[in-house]
Amino acid sequence: MSNTANRLIVFAEKHGRRFFLVDTAEKLSAVALKILRGRYREGWFEEPEVPTKPAEMLLTVEQLALLSNDARKRAEGTKREYERELGVFTRETDAHRRLRRAIDSGDGELAVRVLAGRKEYEYEGWDFEYLESV
């Protein structure tokens, strides 16, 4: 007996749980695409917004050196925060592209990976359960 026999995937969503029999890789891929496409149509996934570049990013090292100690520390902190936001934006953009590629191409295996990457998001949790047999 295969370890996928009698396997269910259970999605824990905001208004309840959804159960699907996924006893083959093909069924798992099909369910992942169904869930991803449905959530996309319902507006679950927003395209990431480019962070606003602060004026401090335009300052050269020489200009920063001319600022008072407090002003320089604030400017450097603002630059670090922008760079952090830019990193988050880049990761979210990559994730959104993978999500769209899975939907647009019908790639069920990629859809499974996208859902796995979002498993810890609110209302996007899921897990496998197994039916017992006699």
Image: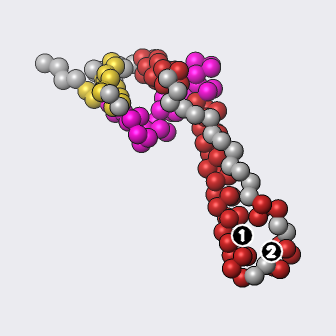
Q: Is residue 122 magenta?
A: yes
**How many neighbours does mark 1 have within 10 angstroms: few (below 14), some (14-19), or many (20 or more)?**
some
Q: Give the range drawn in magenta.
A: 100-128
Residue closer to the observer: 46 or 25:
46
**Within-10-Å neighbours for mark 2: few <14, some 14–19, many 20+:** some
Image quadrant where residue 20 sits: top left
Image-quadrant location for residue 14: top left
Spatial CA span between label 2 and label 1? 8 Å
Residue 19 in view in this figure: yes
Q: Name the residue under label 1.
A: 75
Give percent across and percent down for residue 8.
31, 23
119 horizontally vs 99: left or right: left
Residue 88 tag number: none
As helix, strand or loop, the secondary structure at mark 2 comes to: helix
Residue at the far bottom in the pictured view? 69
Q: Quadrant of the C terminus?
A: top left
Circle 2 residue? 64
Against 70, is 4 above or below? above
Whether residue 117 sits left or right of residue 85 in the image: it is left
Contact (Cβ within 8 Å) of mark 2 with mark 1: yes
Element on which disc 1 rests:
helix
